[in-house]
Image: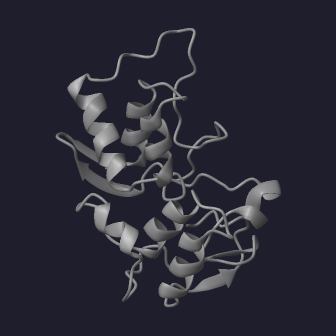
């Protein structure tokens, strides 16, 4: 997955390059399992070419694209930031900064000294925070080379007990 694709997907929606979802097709949602976002007020401040200030605005915009589209998959990389939970039966296989489903990021807004190189493609408006890194990593398998390289690089992103299923990422 490409982090830059998030911005491209939103720009495509804004430019009308993606057809409105026909009623027979499933609309995209930020959470891959269709769950509601739990952090609608999380700031995003994406300027693509209009302002998407927060997760609630992004959630409203994604309903106009198809769930099966590549654009939907790209936008879902922000699911962790917007409060999408990791289903308990998928946690062990999902790449996250915290190693236990009973842990959460102490400060998802903390900007680590080092960030994985894949974040260079992220929209400039997004702060390179522990929460962003964790949200994007959720798109990778825990055993993947990307996960194995990225998690140690953000060792100053601290996890604490409590919260369950990394829902503060």
**Residue 65 pos. (x, y %):** 43, 26
Quarter in which the C terminus is drawn = bottom right
Q: Which residue is at 51% across, 84% downward?
A: 157
The answer, for residue 134, to whether it is visible in the render is yes
User: Which picture quadrant has residue 95?
Assistant: bottom right
**Residue 45 pos. (x, y %):** 27, 54
Q: Which residue is at 53% across, 9% downward?
A: 23
Q: Which residue is at 54% across, 29% downward?
A: 67
Q: Which residue is at 58% across, 21% downward?
A: 26
Farthest residue to the left: give it: 49
Q: How many marks?
A: 0
Relative to 71, residue 165 above or below:
below
**Residue 30 pos. (x, y %):** 52, 42
Farthest residue to the right: give it: 89
State the colouring used for the structure image.
one colour
The answer, for residue 106, to whether it is visible in the render is no
Relative to 115, residue 141 above or below:
above
Relative to 127, residue 50 above or below:
above
Decide which of 9, 149 is in the foreground and name it.
149
Image side of residue 153 versus residue 20, left or right: right
Decide which of 118, 57 is in the foreground and name it.
118
Decide which of 9, 145 is in the foreground and name it.
145
**Residue 96 pos. (x, y %):** 62, 70
Farthest residue to the front: give it: 145
């Amino acid at each position: 997955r490409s982090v830059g694709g998030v911005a491209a997907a939103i720009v495509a929606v804004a430019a009308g390059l993606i057809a409105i979802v026909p009623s027979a097709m499933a609309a995209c949602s930020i959470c891959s399992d269709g769950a509601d976002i739990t952090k609608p007020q999380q700031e995003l401040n994406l300027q693509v070419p209009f302002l998407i200030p927060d997760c609630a605005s992004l959630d409203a915009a994604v309903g106009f694209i198809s769930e099966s589209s590549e654009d939907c998959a790209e936008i879902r990389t922000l699911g962790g930031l917007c409060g999408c939970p990791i289903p308990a039966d998928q946690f062990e296989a999902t790449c996250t900064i915290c190693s236990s489903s009973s842990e959460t990021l102490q400060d998802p807004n903390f900007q680590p000294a080092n960030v994985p190189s894949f974040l260079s493609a992220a929209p400039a408006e997004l702060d390179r925070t522990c929460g962003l890194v964790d949200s994007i990593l959720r798109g990778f398998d825990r055993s993947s080379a990307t996960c194995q390289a990225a998690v140690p690089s953000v060792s100053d992103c601290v996890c604490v007990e409590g919260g369950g299923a990394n829902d503060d990422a």
